[in-house]
């Protein structure tokens, strides 16, 4: 019993490892395959769980626990530890990715900045990009004059430059801009929201909303979570080398009550 209690102090993955070792010590022929059979799962699935190649989720714990005759309190403790670990991993990943994002200062933004300036910055990353006004205008659905002006503005602001190989590059790998105390950035964000509204009837892209009652003391953390989620998702989407489109991601959290 003392040995069992000491195992309870570990997380569920460690508990499974020690339980397998305990059963093997009683019966040297008892294998991982036999353990998987007794747990009602595939042996390859159990192997990945024990090696950490597969996440230990609450659903997995609830699926396996009944076969182990664990008390409900201990099952809930294992679930709590698994959830805490996932949350810590999420914030660690988000923090690392956030470090690679450069917040553009007001003086770095072109005075005439429009939504398509931001789009051109991303279009540079798309496979087959051409620093040609006509090509950019066609891809973004803007005029030739707007495309040429955007290229010139971004180059003058040193947000775009020509590399030694002659190709156009961004000054910063990932960036963001705050509309706080910046009327131009606020205008760009308004234009992006208007684009989203225009696309709703066409069912182009993904658009979803939810209305929720909140406690105001949660808003600060909610804003932090939105920033981390946005940056993590942008990092995920921009990982592949072969990109073929430019998308806008817009997230809003605002009050409807007075």
Image: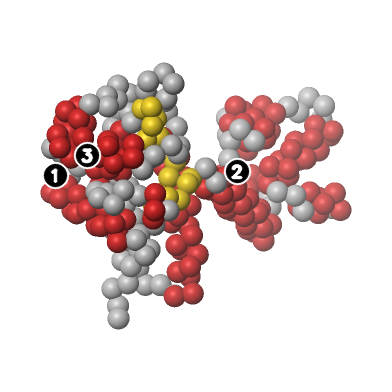
- For mark 2, what is the residue? 56
Check disc 2 and report its element: helix, strand or loop: loop
Residue drawn at x 17%, y 33% is 137
- For mark 3, what is the residue? 149
Q: Nearer the viewer, residue 114 or 70?
A: 114
How many numbered badges does the structure rendering display?
A: 3
- For mark 1, what is the residue? 202
Q: Nearer the viewer, residue 5 or 163?
A: 163
* Picture quarter with the C terminus: bottom left
Residue 161 in sight here: yes
> How much space separates mark 3 and mark 2, taking CA atoms?
52 Å
Dot 1 or dot 2: first in sequence order is 2
Marks 1,2: beta carbons within 8 A: no
Residue drawn at x 45%, y 39% is 172
Closest to the camera, between mark 1 and mark 3, is 3
Its colouring scheme is secondary structure
* Picture coordinates of residue 32, whole percent (x, y): 70, 29
> How much space separates mark 1 and mark 3, taking CA atoms?
29 Å
Classify 10 Å Cα crowding around label 2: few (below 14), some (14-19), many (20 and above): many
């Amino acid at each position: 019993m003392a040995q069992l209690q000491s195992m309870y102090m570990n997380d569920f993955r460690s508990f499974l490892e020690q339980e397998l070792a305990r059963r093997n010590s009683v019966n040297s022929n008892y294998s991982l395959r036999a353990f998987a059979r007794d747990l009602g799962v595939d042996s390859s699935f159990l192997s990945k769980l024990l090696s950490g190649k597969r996440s230990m989720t609450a659903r997995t714990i609830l699926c396996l626990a009944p076969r182990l005759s664990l008390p409900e309190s201990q099952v809930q403790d294992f679930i709590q530890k698994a959830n805490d670990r996932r949350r810590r991993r999420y914030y660690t990943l988000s923090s690392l990715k956030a470090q690679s994002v450069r917040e553009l200062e007001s003086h770095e933004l072109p005075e005439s900045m429009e939504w398509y300036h931001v789009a051109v910055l991303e279009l540079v990353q798309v496979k087959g990009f051409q620093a040609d006004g006509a090509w950019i205008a066609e891809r973004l659905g803007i005029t030739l004059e707007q495309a040429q002006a955007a290229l010139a503005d971004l180059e003058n602001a040193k947000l775009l430059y020509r590399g030694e190989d002659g190709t156009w590059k961004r000054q910063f790998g990932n960036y963001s801009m705050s509309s706080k105390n910046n009327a131009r950035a606020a205008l760009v964000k308004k234009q992006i929201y208007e684009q989203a509204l225009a696309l709703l009837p066409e069912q182009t892209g993904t658009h979803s909303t939810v209305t929720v009652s909140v406690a105001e003391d949660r808003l600060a953390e909610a804003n932090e979570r939105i920033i981390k989620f946005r940056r993590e998702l942008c990092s995920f989407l921009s990982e592949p080398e072969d990109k073929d489109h430019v998308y806008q991601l817009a997230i809003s959290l605002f009050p409807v009550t007075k």
